Image (tube, grey):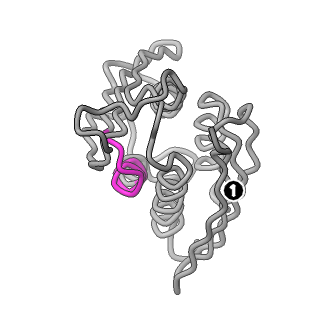
Amino acid sequence: MSARIVKKSRETAETKIEVEINIDGSGRAEVETGVPFFDHMLEQLIRHSGFDIVLKADGDLEIDEHHTVEDTAILLGQACKVALGDKKGIARFGDALVPMDESLVRTAVDWSGRGYLYADLPFSRASLGGFSLEMVEEFLQKFSLNAGLTLHVELLHGKNSHHQVEAVFKSIAIALAKSVQIVSEQIPSTKGVL
């Protein structure tokens, strides 16, 4: 198996982002987006997926966090897609049911090559730590589309918005960790390609 390591960058009039990802890492996170709550959630995603990710983003935060979050998701999705290559040998599917105190989140993923998001995320508040929580779904949508990942994530219950959002990112991380494990020498599809 070749190393599943990728370096990518993306620069627009609104953002400049660089990422290095190692799918077979140990959960090492070096993240700096200028959006503290977003950084905290990305660190959860990285730690619990077992990926190593170094990410630096400079965006037009004087406007708001939208472009930084969206473009980070696009680049992370693209990097994962490249790192997984033809997906030979991966488990392909992964799921997780993650509690965080009173909150509970269910996630399922499929590296189908067809980017799709189903999200049911009735967060208790509209923002947290100056971060608009509508950006969580925006991040997940752009990530799944650019990764070619089918992602279903549901907040089943909870009251504390921090717990709710953190359980979302941890649940996705654990499902991703399961889905990228090498379990065979075959491409996991009857089509022979993903």
Whether residue 140 appears in magenta in the rendering, the answer is yes
* Magenta: main secondary structure: helix
**Residue 72 at what x, y percent from top left?**
53, 61
Displayed quadrant of residue 52: top right
Q: Disc 1 residue type?
A: Glu
Q: Is 92 left, or right, of 36 in this rendering?
A: left
Q: Nearer the viewer, residue 17 or 6?
A: 6
**Mark 1 lies on residue:** 20
Quarter of the figure with the N terminus: top right
For image coordinates 47% across by 17% down, the residue present is 98
Residue placed furthest toward the bottom: 13
Q: Nearer the viewer, residue 6 or 123?
A: 6
For image coordinates 36% across by 21% down, the residue present is 106
Quarter of the figure with the C terminus: top left
Q: Is 47 left, or right, of 11 in this rendering?
A: right
Magenta segment = 139-150
Q: Nearer the viewer, residue 159 or 182?
A: 182
Displayed quadrant of residue 56: bottom right
**Residue 132 at what x, y percent from top left?**
45, 53
**Residue 68 at what x, y percent from top left?**
54, 66
Whether residue 118 appears in magenta in the rendering, the answer is no
Q: Nearer the viewer, residue 72 or 64?
A: 72
Q: Secondary structure at mark 1?
A: strand
- Vertical comparison of 35 with 9: above or below: above
Tag 1: Cα neighbours inside 10 Å, few (<14), some, or many (≥20)?
some
In this rendering, does residue 161 appear at all? no
- Vertical comparison of 7 with 2: above or below: below
